[in-house]
Amino acid sequence: MVRSLLALLPLLACAPKAAAPPPAPWERPSEATPLSKAATLRGFTALALGETADAERAFARALLFDPGGLTPMVGHAQALVALGRVDEAKEVLSAALAAGAEVVAPRALGEALLAVGDPEDARGVLTRWTLTAAAPAAAHAERARLALALGDDDAARLSLTAAISGGARDPALISAWTGLVKDRPGEALAVIEAAAEAAPGDAALGAALLELAWRAGDARAAQIALWRLEEPSPALIGWVSRWLSRPPEEQRALAALASAERPCALLTGEDCAGVGPWFAEERRILGGEPLDGLGAAYGAVEALLNRQAWAEAEAASAALLAQAPGWPPALVVLGRAQLGGGDAEAARITLGEAVALRPHWPGALTAWSEALLATGRRAEAYAALMRAARSPGAPPAARAALASFGAPQ
């Protein structure tokens, strides 16, 4: 019996087997060939150049060489969308989704699904597209772009946080992220600072940190951001100097306006001394309404001081002070005019009043130091100049004056 069974084994081995149905193209592993890779590369190049017809032909050729290729499938769908062949694109995208194309091209797949009017499947791609914290910054940035396109602010914020912390430097992404976290300045500052540590000379990061510091009312972060900017504009230095001259409670009052007003120097590169928001806030702190023409009047006094027209400057600054009683910038220009005109004692009193109102303002401290020195109060002048020079927002002139001051008596 055993011998008969053994004799049957060779016959059984040679018996024909039931043929299994061949797998659908997207149910088998992709077998990319050099020809399919070359055609796929050509397709994406043509897409980037806007040559959509060439791109569609290239992707179709790639799929002839590799019918199950996930990457050329997604590229083909993108090209079809660009050509307006939406129905064909939907068929390709359906096959790509079934084959798991989100593994190789999730952002492209999600954006193509969104373009053909299938936001739910696009959101599904985003939801299933998970990344570890150790994933490259570029991968987090790609996910963030899809989240932004889908309007998913929470997913975009998380992905952008990871991307920027990991070193992403795309200004568009930084701008988008800054807008998403404008009401969460603590979180914003932490991420921007981490990115700025990796690229201390990056002007975009420095400017973003400075804006967020302004929103948060965080003077220390603003100081760090200004130091990191290799060549900040004089307008930006002037704006930060004036902002840092405020006591903490006034900085908080300024930060409260962040949702409606943004730092004009960061937006336009202009000196805030000549435009509205800064003056409006100064007047708000003083309890009054902003006065029309205040910036122009201040600029006119500065021009007179630069020409050393002391008498005219004193008259103009007195008129400015009458227009804005107790306004520290008006007191400073009046004191400078008095000092230039030879009335050092009056200048000392006027500038001392400005310092009392703005005890951290380097500009007021430096001018007051000059008046103190002119009235023989050398030790007090040195102390005022030291306070001015130590301020992170101090102009170079303050440090230069301290360096040439010599030992106080």
Image (cartoon, rainbow, N blue to C red):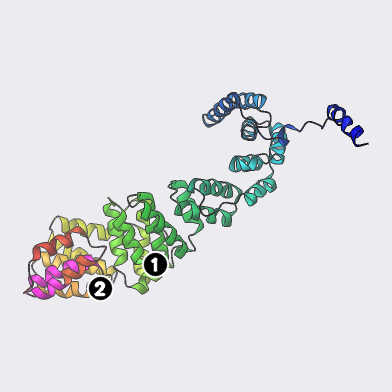
Decide if residue 277 is on the left or right side of residue 34.
left
Residue located at (17% from left, 62% from top): 399
Prevailing secondary structure class for the magenta stretch in the rendered image: helix
Badge 1 crowding class, 10 Å Cα cut-off, few under 14, some 14 to 19, many 20 or more, is many
Other-residue count near label 2 (Cα within 10 Å), few / some / many at <14 / 14–19 / ≥20? some
Q: Secondary structure at mark 1?
A: loop
Task: Please provide percent x and percent y for residue 78.
Answer: 62, 34
Residue 322's x, y, as percent?
26, 70
Compared to residue 219, the image places residue 11 above or below, namely: above
Nearer to me, 373 or 343: 373
In the rendered image, residue 209, in percent from the top left (x then y), is placed at 39, 57
Region in magenta? 356-383
The mark that comes first in sequence, 1 or 2, is 1
Q: Is residue 155 above or below residue 372?
A: above
Eyeballing the image, is 3 above or below 170? above
- The span from disc 1 to disc 2 (Cα, nearest Å) is 18 Å
Query: Which quadrant holds residue 14?
Result: top right
Amino acid bearing label 1: Gly
Residue that carries the numbered disc 1 in the rendered image: 217
Q: Is residue 215 above or below residue 42?
A: below
Residue at image point 29% right, 69% down: 324
Image spot of residue 380 (x, y percent):
13, 75
Closer to us: 20 or 118 = 20
Amino acid type for the residue under numbered disc 2: Pro
**What is the quadrant of the N terminus in the image?**
top right
Residue 359 shows which numbered tag?
Answer: 2
Q: Tell which of 268 and 338 is nearer to you.
A: 268
* Residue 207 visible within the image: no
**Residue 283 versus residue 118: which sits nearer the camera?**
118
- In the rendered image, is residue 283 in sight? yes
Quarter of the image where one finds residue 195: bottom left
Please tell me whether mark 2 sits on a helix, a strand or a loop: loop
